[in-house]
Amino acid sequence: MNTSPYLQKYQQAAVQTSSGPQLLLMLYDGAIKFVRSGIEGIEERKPEKANTNLQKAQRIVNELTASLNFDYEISNNLARLYEYMMHQLIQANSRKAAEPAREVLNYLIDMRETWATAMKKPIMESTQ
């Protein structure tokens, strides 16, 4: 893992200057990365690696849940989905079973792609 002070400063600046939608993509990217690493840890029979990364993914899913705006009806559905993902991540970690984590990974990838597409849509519509 690269812990260069320059890289850390760059990452900090990237987070501080990103818009809300960009931050959401960054959260999804981080969760995807950590779930993948957690699955690797399970498959490599490295419980510490699995535990560390699945817990990091859980923290990001908690952050996604905390960022929901319940003024919108969809937030209730997302909250239930995030709750289910948390349950699956806990199951994957406690049983060291990759399948629940793979299910979460698929949800996260789909949600990230959907969000990335939604971010582009207003730009495309305004240029037509």
Image (cartoon, grey):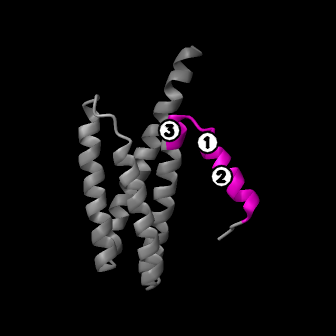
Residue found at the far right of this picture: 6
Q: What residue type is labelled 3?
A: Ala
Give the CA distance from mark 1 to mark 2.
9 Å
Q: Is residue 76 placed above or below 90 in the rendered structure?
A: above
Q: Give the image quarter of residue 60.
A: bottom left
* Residue at 29% across, 29% down: 72
Tell me the residue at 43%/39% (across/down).
114
Q: Do the residues labelled 2 and 3 touch (CB within 8 Å)?
A: no
Q: Measured from the top left, where is residue 29 in percent x and y?
A: 51, 52
Q: What stretch is highlighted in magenta?
A: 4-23
Which mark is first along the chain, 2 or 1? 2
Rendering quarter of residue 52: bottom left
Q: Is the magenta stretch mostly helix, strand or loop?
A: helix
Residue in the image at 45% along x and 64% along y:
56
Asked if the stretch drawn in magenta spans residue 34, the answer is: no
Q: Where is residue 100 in the image (x, y as percent from the top left)?
A: 30, 67
Residue topped by disc 2: 11
Q: Where is mark 1, residue-wise?
A: 16
The amino acid beneath tag 1 is Gln
Residue carrying label 3? 116
Q: What residue type is labelled 2?
A: Gln
Give the mark toward the camera: 3 or 1.
Answer: 1
Where, quadrant-wise, is the N terminus in this rendering?
bottom right
What is the crowding at mark 2: few (fewer than 14 residues within 10 Å), some, or many (at least 20)? Answer: few
Q: Tell me the element at label 2.
A: helix
Q: Where is residue 54 in the image (x, y as percent from the top left)?
A: 41, 68
Judge the density around disc 3: few (<14), some (14-19), many (≥20) Cα neighbours within 10 Å.
some
